[in-house]
Amino acid sequence: MKLGIVTAYPPSKVTLNEYAYHLVKHFRQHNEVSELILYTDVMPQEADLEFEEDGCAITVKPCWKFNDYFNLFKITKAIKETKPDAVLYNLQFMKFGDSKIPAALGLFTPWMTKLMRIPTIILLHNIMEAVDLDSAGFTKNKLKAKVFNFIGVKLTEVMLKADRVAVTISKYVTTLEGKYLARNVRLIPHGTFEIPEEPSYTSDEGPLKIMTFGKFGTYKKVEALIEAVEMVRIRTNRDLEIVIAGTDNPNTPGYLANVQKTYSQVPNLRFTGYVEEEDVPAIFSESAMVVFPYTSTTGSSGVLHQAGSYGKAVVMPDLGDLSILVKEEGYRGEFFDPNSVRSLSKAIEKLVVNEQHRITIAKANYKAATALPMSLIADMYVNAFNEIIEQKDTNKLMVA
């Protein structure tokens, strides 16, 4: 199979680029994939293709840019030129831009690919029905929210015209089948990026590192984490370090700089900035726990799967998609009320003072992560493409 993937790709800073890197890594090893074509927003000489293992050939085809009004035509042209056997789109609603028109126009591309009679699957990481527009930083205006939701419904209908739409949470399947009467939706889990050897689970000497990882400023706020850890320090007199790994959300530029200034007097508070792919293992391995200071969720959590793969205990808000993931995939954690800093501090404190409890959760998360490696996820996509191809061949015979 000559497989095309439309996606952001490292070193791009556009969302989902890290997911693409790991998916590509495992597609390369699949015995049914003979060639990969990456339709990306980065130039071939920039693309991170330094894989240790041998695999199939990869062609990088730069053909779209964030907020470009003509991405639909540029991607379609690139696909016509390269003639893949099948195309996978790695998407969420703001994948092609944070301006409304280019963002919306880009989401028509999978439909165009299907009209070209190329088997097409969309990996849709979130759905509008699961996004709190206020918390996610889109709008606080109720009228605008209604307009956004209406547009979101119409764009969902467009994306459902692909041969298959893969989602990572069972609730999304139920919503798309119930509300849109879709019959081409499949549950394909998020998967775990890397499965390192099982860790020792014991913490390094020095301060106990409490880490959070992501793009912050909308529904991911770090102020509550900082204040909660300060409470735990006072109550336990433990040596704790707060590690905030990541960058601003594109919708909230300058957020972390303002937080750093506001909390400059807080000891052992470290902001790492953007974490390069090769530095991710160290950030997780050095941490005693990973905290999710979220006020809402917008889809499956790559950070949760990463935390599990490195054998880390987690502290999560008891809401939405994270709770579903825990139940469906076997993850464990300490939960807190997302509206209460005190609740967050209590959850963190349980893992700080009780090392055995922390290790028990960490081991459960490692077990959950190892059950869904990216190699298995890549296999699910190849099987889905084979089903589409077989169905199209059957339809041709029936017509003949």
Image (tube, rainbow, N blue to C red):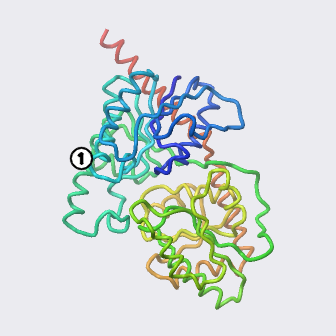
Q: Residue at x 45, y 22 (%)?
A: 82
Instruction: Point out residue 290 in the picture as x, y percentages from the top left corner.
Output: 62, 67
Q: Is residue 197 above or below residue 80?
A: below
In the foreground, 391 or 375: 375
In the foreground, 328 or 67: 67
Instruction: Point out residue 44 in the picture as x, y percentages from the top left corner.
Output: 54, 34
Instruction: Point out residue 278 in the picture as x, y percentages from the top left corner.
Output: 67, 51
Q: Is residue 169 above or below residue 110?
A: below
Question: What secondary structure is marked by label 1?
Answer: helix
Instruction: Point out residue 242 in the picture as x, y percentages from the top left corner.
Output: 63, 75
What type is the residue that disc 1 sits on?
Lys
Question: In terms of image quadrants, where is residue 269?
Answer: bottom right
Q: Tell me if 248 is positioned left or right of 242 in this view.
A: left
Question: For the view shown, which residue lies furthest in the top direction?
Answer: 400
Q: Residue at x 36, y 65 (%)?
A: 137
Quarter of the image with the C terminus in it:
top left
Q: Which residue is mark 1?
A: 154
